[in-house]
Every structure is written in C-alpha cells, then in structure tokens.
Image (cartoon, rainbow, N blue to C red):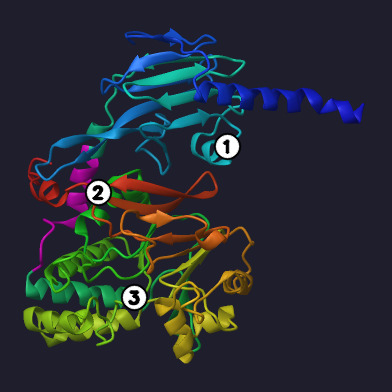
Amino acid sequence: MRYFSGWPSKLSKLLARLRAFAARFGFGWGHHLKLGDAYRLGTSKVRVPIEGLAIEVTLGLGDKRLHLYPETRIGPGGKPIMLDSYLVVDPRTHLQRIGGFLRLTPKSWLAIGSGDPLQQALFEFPPAVDEQHLVVIYGRDSLAFRNLGDAGSSIAPVIDDPRSRRAEKFRRLRAVLGGPVELLPRADALSLIEDVNRLMREEAYRVLDDRGLPGGLLSLPERLAPILVADLHAQVDNLLTVLTQNAFLDGLEDGTAALVILGDAVHSEEDGRLREMESSMILMDLIFRLKQRFPGQVFYVRGNHDSFSEDIAKAGIPQGLLWAKELGERRGNAYLKAMGEFYALLPYVVVAQDFVACHAAAPTMKVSREMLVNIHRHPKLILDLINNRLRKANRPQGYGRGDIKRLRRALDLDPSAAFIVGHTPLDREHTLWLDVDGIDHHHVLFSANPDQVGVFTRVGGMMVPLIYPVDSLTPVLNGIDVEGA
C-alpha cells in the first residue's frame, strides 16, 4: 500500500505539468474577452487585449490575489514611460514591505503556483493554491489566461495605481536627504565626511580586530533584510531608483533593512565620461548623507576603485589619480585626506546567515574568520577580495568553485548560502548574473547599467535578485516643493 499511496499526488503533479505545457503551446485557442468586470475562468484560454490596464488575478475563491501591472519608468522629463513588460505582485505587500515580483515580457509565459519555491517565498501561497494553478501568456496583442487549478481562478480589472505610493517615496527621500541631489558646498562636504568617519570608527556590526578597531568583516544580524548593490560607478539615478523602489526606504527608516554597497561607487564606466568626476562626488555625497542619517543601516564594502592609486585606470585613463586631483582642487587637501581615511576604515567582506559578499573574488589562499577580521595583517588577502576575478584559461590565478566553498566553510555558512560579488560584469547589456560559471549560488552583480539596476534582497527567507528600470530621478527629487511636501 505504501507504494501506491503516492500515486494520486504524483499523478496530479504530472497532469498539472501537462496542462501547463498544453496551455503554453496553444492547445485550445480560447476566446477574446473585453475585461470590464470580474470573470471566472473555465477550462479554456481567455485572451484579454493589451490596453495598458492592470489586471487582478484571484486564485481559488479568494484564496490569493495577485495584480499584473504594466511596468513603467520615469523618463528625463519626469513623465512615466510605458514599457513592454508586466509585473506580477502581491497587492497586500507591494511597496509596503520588502518583497519581490515576477516579470512577464513579450512572447513569454508564467506558470503561477505554489510549486515554485521562489514564487512561494514572494507570494506566500495558501494551501488552496495548486503547484501550477494558472498560466499567463504574453502574446502579440493580448494576455492569455488559462486556469489549471482545481479551485479555479478569476480575473478582473484593477483601479488602484501604485504609482501614487511610489511618488510619496520620492517626497520622503528628498526629506531624508535634507536637500537637492547636487554637489555639496566645500565646507558642508568636509563637515559631512568628517562626521561619517567618526561614525565609521565605531560602526555597527563590525567585528573588532586585534587593535580594537573595526576589522575587515561586517556581520549583519538575521533581523536586517539586506539590500545589496555593487559597482554603481557614478550612476546617481541608479541608487535613487533603488531607494524609491520596493519598501527599501521604509526598511532603512524603521531599522529592519541594511543597504550594502559592494564597492566602486565612483568612476564612470560610460564611454565618453571616463574622465568626468563630478558625478562621482555627487554620488559619494549622497552615500555619506545616507550613512549620516542611517548609521546602523547603510554600509559600504571596499572595492578596487575606492583608492587614489595610479593602478586604477580604464581605457588608459588614470581614474584613481584623476579622482585625487579633482577632490584636492575642488574640496581641498583636508577633504582629500578624509576620503583616504574613509577608505581605510571600510570593511572588505559582509556576511549574514544566508550569504557572503565582497567586491571582487573569493580568496584563493587559505582563509579564516580571524584573517578576515584582522585583514590589516594580510595585504594579499585584500588584493584577492578587491581585485581578483573568476578563473579562466587566460587567468589561472583567478578564483573558482573550491575557493568559494572554502570561504563558506571559514564563515560557518551552509553550502547553499549565496556568494555575491561585483567587479566583473559578464556583458554590457545586463545587471546581474546567476549561478555564474555553473557554480550554484554564485552570483555577479553590476549596478551601473544606465538602463537597469540590479539588487539582491531577502524575501520569505530566500535571497532573491530583482531588476528595476532606471528612472531619471535627480530632476524629479530636485523639483519637489519642500515647503509643500
């Protein structure tokens, strides 16, 4: 009897997969529907014309509701621009607590259900939602819906517009920053960085080294939801986009989240802007204002560009030396010295119970927690963490699968803990890459793409990647009427 007891469940799962396959590849063309009211799905497809409207999906008889919103971005004139994609979100939590979403793009499909661990983490499906409950297909001129769940599904138009909630975040961020997003006056900039350096000398969650100073390891408690970005490279709007998306700003304000920047906020990577340093200064001012406002929620992990070294160069342009020259000329030697002190005070590795991250690479040497804490004693370890790259045929000195495993063991992490780095984007079209080089839970993050910005955060106990279109937010925030806000 034990052999047969699993058959109904296995058969149900197999049938659900077959139904999803059939729904995806067009068996049963269904009919078109002009969605004006709630509609209960039957056994055939229903096609809803794409008209820029949001759609509510109800799984079961009110057991779970999801919203499909047309995705938009804010253009240079501050006006929303409609994108081709739809976001699938939980309306109970969207923009109200840190969460995630699914993205539906043209000529693609989603099988929505509790059988996907990521969806279960994002949407907290109740037991009534089947493993594959509903298929949504983005066709040429319509969205097609087909119910697969035993409890049924329905669709309805949505009146709510989440953009008003996001606009409220713009006003709050402007208030947090205490002024427009622009280059601070010389005296104000010096006062700010000196205050930040005072905070850094007693920074929260830093393990003290053998000198009694904040060591090279930042150890985040489980209660803090991480917000990881890497390699912003002077893209101010990328950071502003992150801060006004999701409930990231809420998490900083209520002390439940931690923004962690994995190095290299400075030095533009865009063609034609490699010598330009003002945007780097504006972005560092912004980061310092956030650190001053949220000292226990904002952290910066050192990268290779966080230096004045002559070795920091791009396309033959000595960005490290230019950075020092510009800071000295525009803000004085005292500010230049304070920036050097800031770099010296930075951690090199951040760890939590389910991830470890650094700027560039896992160490290729034997490593221990004690070495990471007392990193001032290990200059080669520093170079590995901020400069090395993945091992390739032309880079035999790079890191590999075994080095990542050794780092996890040194920090007593589970083998499934995510290892996240920046430094080495795989191409210029994307912003993050998962399971890189076939190594499970090894991810690369590059948050300086001018069109999209990648983030890692924790949702439902799972580290999840999120990608947002970059909004032109600097003029939006600077145009807010502070008196009337």
Q: From the image, which quarter does the C terminus lie in?
A: top left
Query: Is 224 part of what is drawn in magenta?
Result: no
Answer with left or right where residue 266 lies relative to residue 229. Answer: left
The residue tagged 1 is: 116
Q: Between residue 29 and residue 184, name the one nearer to us.
A: 29
Q: How far apart, in angstroms, are the residues tagged by discs 2 and 1?
A: 28 Å
Q: Tell me which amino acid carries mark 2.
A: Val
Image x and y of residue 339, in percent? 23, 80
| Residue pictured at 31% horizontal, 80% vertical | 343
Secondary structure, magenta segment, majority class: helix
Q: What amino acid does circle 1 point to?
A: Asp
Of the image marks 2 and 3, the number of the one nearer the N terminus: 3
Tell me if mark 3 has few (under 14), some (14-19) or many (20+) residues whose alpha carbon lies within 10 angstroms of its own: many
Please name the residue shown 36% across and 66% down the image.
299
Q: Image quadrant for the N terminus?
A: top right
The dot on residue 470 is 2
Tell me where the magenta segment starts and ends, as one range: 167-184
The residue singled out by tag 3 in the image is 200
Disc on the earlier residue, 2 or 1:
1
Q: CA distance from mark 2 to mark 3?
A: 30 Å
Q: Position of residue 268 (x, y in %)?
A: 21, 67
Q: Nearer the viewer, residue 222 or 442?
A: 442
Q: Position of residue 477 (x, y in %)?
A: 14, 48
Q: Say if mark 2 contacts mark 3, CB within 8 Å.
A: no
Q: Is residue 58 above or below residue 240?
A: above
Q: Secondary structure at mark 1?
A: loop
Specify few, some or many for label 2: CA neighbours under 10 Å numbering under 14, 14-19, or 20 or more.
many
Q: Is residue 36 left or right of residue 350?
A: left
